């Protein structure tokens, strides 16, 4: 099993979610996060005063999937969240040793 963490633009959530549902992914966790990479933030003027916004708002998607779904999930997230501009995000992939469904006590792939 794999854990996929994707940092994406907020406005891309709906199309990414729809794409993942189309390939049979029916669960994910979404968190609002802030950070920066090469984009490095931006300057904004508010009431005549310039402010530097260093940490940009993004969304973090977290999914635990079966190994055979990995390439398909990466393809959907990449294609649906790409704008071609700096700040499109990143995808991180981790190995998952085990999953336990709290309600039933089921473990492993059946708990995903």
Image (spheres, helix red, strand yellow):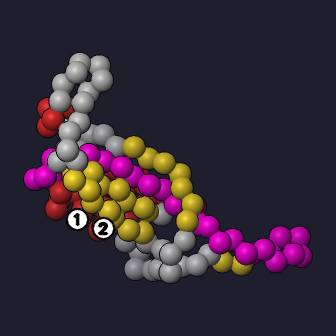
Quarter of the image where one finds residue 8: bottom left
Asked if 23 appears above or below 78 in the picture, the reply is: above
Callout 1 secondary element: helix
x and y, in percent, of residue 36 in the image: 54, 71
Magenta residue check for 24: no
Identify which residue is drawn at 73% across, 75% down. 52
| Residue 108 shows in this picture | yes
Image-based side of 49 in relation to 77, left or right: right
x and y, in percent, of residue 102 in the image: 30, 23
Whether the residues at callouts 2 and 1 have beta carbons within 8 Å, the answer is yes
Callout 2 secondary element: helix
| Residue 23 shows in this picture | no
Identify which residue is drawn at 48% across, 48% down. 31
Asked if 28 appears above or below 55 in the picture, the reply is: above
99 and 5: which one is in front?
Answer: 99
Mark linked to residue 75: 1
35 and 50: which one is in front?
Answer: 35
x and y, in percent, of residue 98 in the image: 20, 39
Asked if 107 appears above or below 83 in the picture, the reply is: above
View extreme (top): residue: 104
Identify which residue is drawn at 36% across, 49% down. 62
Label 2 belongs to which residue? 78
Crowding near the residue tagged with mark 2, few <14, some 14–19, many ≥20 C-alpha atoms within 10 Å: some
Q: Main secondary structure of the magenta part?
A: strand
Crowding near the residue tagged with mark 1, few <14, some 14–19, many ≥20 C-alpha atoms within 10 Å: few
Distance in Å between CA atoms under marks 2 and 1: 5 Å
């Amino acid at each position: 099993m794999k854990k996929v963490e994707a940092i994406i633009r907020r406005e891309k959530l709906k199309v990414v979610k729809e794409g993942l549902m189309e390939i049979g992914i029916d669960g994910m966790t979404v968190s609002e996060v802030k950070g920066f990479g090469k984009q490095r933030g931006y300057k904004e003027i508010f009431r005549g005063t310039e402010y530097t916004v260093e940490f940009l708002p993004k969304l973090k998607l977290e999914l635990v999937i079966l190994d055979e779904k990995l390439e398909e999930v990466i393809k959907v997230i990449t294609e649906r969240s790409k704008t071609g501009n700096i700040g499109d995000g990143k995808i991180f992939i981790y190995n998952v040793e085990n999953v336990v469904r709290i309600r039933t006590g089921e473990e492993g792939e059946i708990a995903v």
